[in-house]
Structure formats: C-alpha cells, structure tokens
Image (cartoon, grey):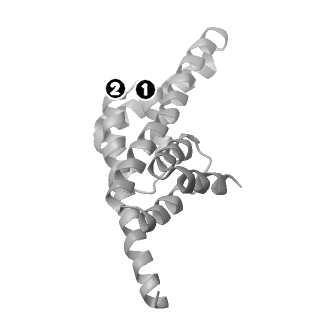
Amino acid sequence: MFAEFLISLVYAFGYLGLFAASVIGSASVILPVPIFLLIFVAGGLLNPLAVGIIAGIGSAIGELTAYAVGFGSRKLLGKKKKKKPAKAEGASEWFRRAETWMHKRGGFVVILIFAATPLPDDVIGIICGGIKYDIKKFFIACLLGKIILSLGIAYAGFYGAQWILSYLGL
C-alpha cells in the first residue's frame, strides 16, 4: 500500500514526485521502504541521470531524520542522567566509544560508504546525531553517497528496461 503511494507520486508528478518519494522513503528510520525499486523503475521511464541526482538529493534530505533521532536521543539521555546516573553513564560511554570509532575510521568516509551502498545508513545517521558530528559534513557525505547509489540504480533501471523490452521484442 505504501509502495503504491510512492509509485503514484512518481507517476503523477514525475521528477517532483520522485523527489518527494525519496525524501519520504529515506526519512523512515529503521523501517525499510522500497525506494530502490522506485528509482530502478523511474530510471527506466525517465532520464536516468536526472533520476539519480534528484533521488539522491531527496534521499540525503530524508536521512537527516536519522541524524535528528540520534541528536534527540542524546538530549533525552542527558536528562535521564540526573535521575539515574548508572544507566546514563552506560549510554554516555556508548556515545563516547561511537565517537572514538567514527574519528578513528574517518567519519566522512564511513558515512559516504554507508550512503553509497545498501548498508543500514540509518544507524550511522543516529550515531552521528548522537555524537554531534558536524551536520554539514554528514549531509555532504550522505548527499554524495546517495547520488552515487541512486545513479547506479537509475542506470540499472534504464539499461534493464531496455534489455527487457528488446528481449520481448517491443
């Protein structure tokens, strides 16, 4: 039902619908939304270069939701610290380790790799928000990765649709 709604956005509004569907699809934290299928189909129907760029921008904007969840959870855990210091210390220890891990591995590159692949980038977004990673750097890395991923999927849809049509003799 939700996938049909996203497809109807693209069908009714073209590139603008694709942008909206990409934002909505990427804004769902942890819950999987079939945005890859939508980009694949749109790449076969519309200009794949435009589809990849527009879907990438929309997806990067949608990923800011995961960042906001992490940022908000950090604030919530900070408030709990006053009431229950033992549990809050465990949470702040987790954030400290996550921050060390991100700095050691090169946070920008980690975000870029997760955004450019089907890896669960929502988790990275939550971590980045929780450790207060620079939101500009997060967005730029996410934007580059999502455009790369979306371009690959859109061109796969373009050439895949051409192959299927030629195979069927249409």
Q: Which residue is mark 2?
A: 134
Q: Secondary structure at mark 2?
A: loop
Which is nearer the eye, 33 or 130? 33
Amino acid marked by disc 1: Ile
- Picture coordinates of residue 55 (x, y %)? 42, 50
Which is nearer the eye, 83 or 28? 28
- Picture coordinates of residue 130 (x, y %)? 48, 27
Amino acid marked by disc 2: Asp
Crowdedness of circle 1 by 10 Å Cα count: few (<14), some, many (20+)? many
Residue 146 disc label: none
Up/down of 59 relative to 156, above or below: above
Q: Secondary structure at mark 1?
A: loop
At horizontal 44% and vertical 37% (from top left) the residue drawn is 61
Q: Residue furthest right?
A: 1
Up/down of 78 relative to 147, above or below: above
Which is nearer the eye, 86 or 105? 105
Crowdedness of circle 2 by 10 Å Cα count: few (<14), some, many (20+)? few
- Picture coordinates of residue 35 (x, y %)? 53, 55
- Picture coordinates of residue 34 (x, y %)? 57, 57
Q: Quadrant of the N terminus?
A: bottom right
Alpha carbon of mark 2 to alpha carbon of mark 1: how far? 9 Å
Closer to the observer: label 2 or label 1?
Answer: 2
Q: Is residue 21 visible?
A: yes
At horizontal 63% and vertical 22% (from top left) the residue drawn is 87
Q: Residue furthest top?
A: 82
Q: Are marks 2 and 1 in contact (CB under 8 Å)?
A: no
Q: Quadrant of residue 48?
A: bottom left
Q: Is residue 113 visible?
A: no
At horizontal 56% and vertical 42% (from top left) the residue drawn is 24
Which is nearer the eye, 100 or 65? 65
Q: Which residue is mark 1?
A: 131
